Amino acid sequence: MAKSKDTVALVCSIAELSAIFEESHSLDEFLCAVVRTVATHMRADVCSVYLFDDRHEELVLRATQGLNPASVGTVTLKVGEGLCGMAIKELRPIREAVASKSPFFKQVPGSFEEQYEAFLVVPILRGLKPVGVLVVQDHQTDYFTRDDARALQAIASQLASTVANAKLLLSLHEIQKGEAPCANCVQGLFRGHAVSSGVAHGPASVWDPGHRGGQRLEIPADAGGGVVAFRDALRRSELQLVALQRQTEASLGHEVAMIFDAQQLLLRDEKIEGEMRRRIEAGEDAGAVIVAVFNDYIQTFAASSMEMLREKVHDLKDLGHRMLQNLSPADEDARADYSGHIVISAGLLPSDVVKLVAQRAGGLVMVGGGVNSHASILARALGIPLVIIEDEDVLRIEEETVVLLDGIEGRLLVNPDQAFVDSYRSLLDHAGEDPAAPAAPGLTATRDGTRITLQANINLMGEVALAWQQGAEGIGLYRSEFPFLIRNDFPSEEEQLRIYRSIIDLAEGREVVLRTLDIGADKILSYMPAWNEANPALGLRSIRFSLKNRPIFAQQLRAMLRAGEGQSLKIMFPLISSLEELHAARGCVESAIQALCDEGLACNRNPQLGIMIESPAAVELAAALARECDFFSIGTNDLVQYLLAVDRTNEHVVDLYIDHHPVVLRSIKKVIDAAGAAGIPLSVCGEMAANERLLPVLLGMGLRCLSIEPRSVAAVQTAIMQIDLAQAETQAAAILQSDEIGRTAELLEQ
């Protein structure tokens, strides 16, 4: 039976809410009266009020009748985000019969709003300045009428002045009472960008923004012990590090486990260990000596002009904590410093991410940085939640403060109340479990039977097994730079050989594409002499670096050629922009083959050589390059940034990084056509390859091979199986005729 609504009575009642406000002790109490009154008269299951935060330019849920009360004060929406955000952006009411079918709909986990489909939102405006939004929802679809929208607009109009004045007056009262917030305390909600999905709840560990982890150790309350206790702590620490390295090698691969070499070397350093031992033998307290010695080295390393030494600060701090933990005989199993912690840092290196995963950190927060940086890519690959937050106030959170990290919505909640934590309970209970469901058995094909190949992008050896589990058919991109990035020095030819051979062996006959070193821009080797560049993304990176550093390039090519002996070997060069660069790289391969043969070392003498198309120059030369290559791969992350002149790691211009820009899609089509004309295989890797909205267009343009992150394989396969290729080709043809970004977006939604 339909519910009756008395919208006339509702408007009259709201006009009296200013009197209710006079009796309220707070703005929140007043808003609670508003939502109760509106929900009752509208016969709506839900009524909510969001207020606009001018400082952060976002809507904050301040009162609700019907949604989870724990969401109040924690749910936020940026301008243009969700139906509420669109109402503020466009300054107009939005009415949806079935909200979940709207392209602007955004579900907020933990709010319990998924059961309410009918949706009506109107902006609360004072002139043209947004004050907030008023929302009603109901489980009955198509519940709200045009009359309801007009009534709600009238209510919002009456609320605007009262709410705006109330905010001002209440702020004044708080100042008069001297209730200004504590300048040294950080509370509430930080909004950011979700980079790696997942949820974590635990104590915060904040790395000093001034010099990457330069915090000093503190003397614990129970510090004590003499020579015997010190020697025992030293022995136990060494055994734990060895065990940790072995566990890491078993789960993530030996190229990752090498990062713990530094701590073991520091532990065995005669100067560090000897100084502590001599002072303790002279009668000083063991705990105090450990703190003093490690703090001296932390300060020295942090102040060094050598980046390589500055990066050792975390190793020193970790090792010092481990030694202090092991001083207590009762603590027979000293845990890693970051077990269950949410680490907040002004900057994370790829090696930091790997080490924190190995040490069982619960989640990561980076202040600044890009969602496509290599630390971000590693976090996704290793399955640890990561959120990027621009607000540097997050670095002022006190150590051990309990926080909740939402890597789904991109939020960090400081000291969340129990009700809100409980709303995340199901996600927290499954934290750490691999959420990726395996792909359906059999090969991937569109709905009409067109065969599509799905391959995996691999960063670390430990991901290979996951790729096969998820249904990947090969390795379309092995990023060879990660063993370089997570170390403190260059891996030798023999160490590289071991890594590449292991990758090929694990493939068990499946295709493997090894990409040569892609460093520079946001991927800097700390052990290389620094070079200053005004525009690193346009500087000495990728194939340019390799051709400028021939001995390093030759060593890597030799390792790849030796690893591919007796196998079908594919080597790919990144960021090729001219035929001359391709010829130079090919010449280096030929020289390496000749040198290996002269030395009597077995190698692959006929590797297939391909390039990654990532620059506008390569797009324009695609036909000529295709005639001299064995295969192509389109690296969409860099291609988009270079085509649009938008730094993909700069959050200030993230809204301009548009993968459906007409020039991006036309460039991809040009490369597809060039590869087809030359008869060479082509794949696409990068974020676009896993973008389900763009999949019909990519397939409609002729693409038949995608290389994606292992955890995305099942979702992409499901999306492909629903695509009708004839319809996709029609859609792609229409989109390629569009000159406007907005029109392209509209066609993508059809």
Image (spheres, rainbow, N blue to C red):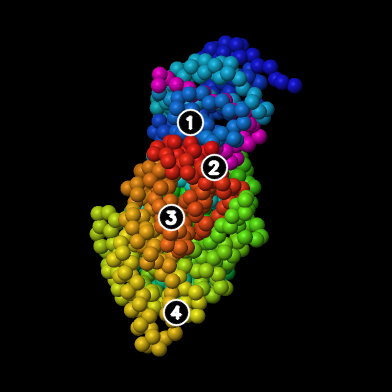
Q: Of callouts 1 and 3, which one flags the residue occurring earlier in the amino acid sequence?
A: 1
Label 1: few (<14), some or many (≥20) within 10 Å? many
Q: Point out residue 718 in the picture as x, y percentages from the top left corner.
A: 61, 51
Residue on which the image places disc 3:
673
Q: Which quarter of the figure is the C terminus placed in? A: top right
Q: Of callouts 1 and 4, which one flags the residue occurring earlier in the amino acid sequence?
A: 1
- Which of discs 1 and 3 lies nearer the camera? The answer is 3
Residue on which the image places disc 4:
604
Q: Of callouts 2 and 3, which one flags the residue occurring earlier in the amino acid sequence?
A: 2
Mark 2 and mark 3: span between their CA atoms? 54 Å
Mark 1 and mark 3: span between their CA atoms? 39 Å
Mark 1 and mark 4: span between their CA atoms? 57 Å
- Which of discs 2 and 1 lies nearer the camera? The answer is 1
Horizontal placement of 152 versus 78: left or right?
A: right
Horizontal placement of 92 versus 417: left or right?
A: left
Residue on which the image places disc 1:
86
What are the residue bounds of the magenta stretch? 106-128
Is 112 one of the magenta-colored residues?
yes
- Residue beneath the point at 39% across and 50% down: 667
- Name the element at disc 2: loop
Amino acid carrying mark 3 in the image: Asp
Q: Does 77 appear above or below 120? A: below
Is 721 or 79 nearer to us in this picture?
721
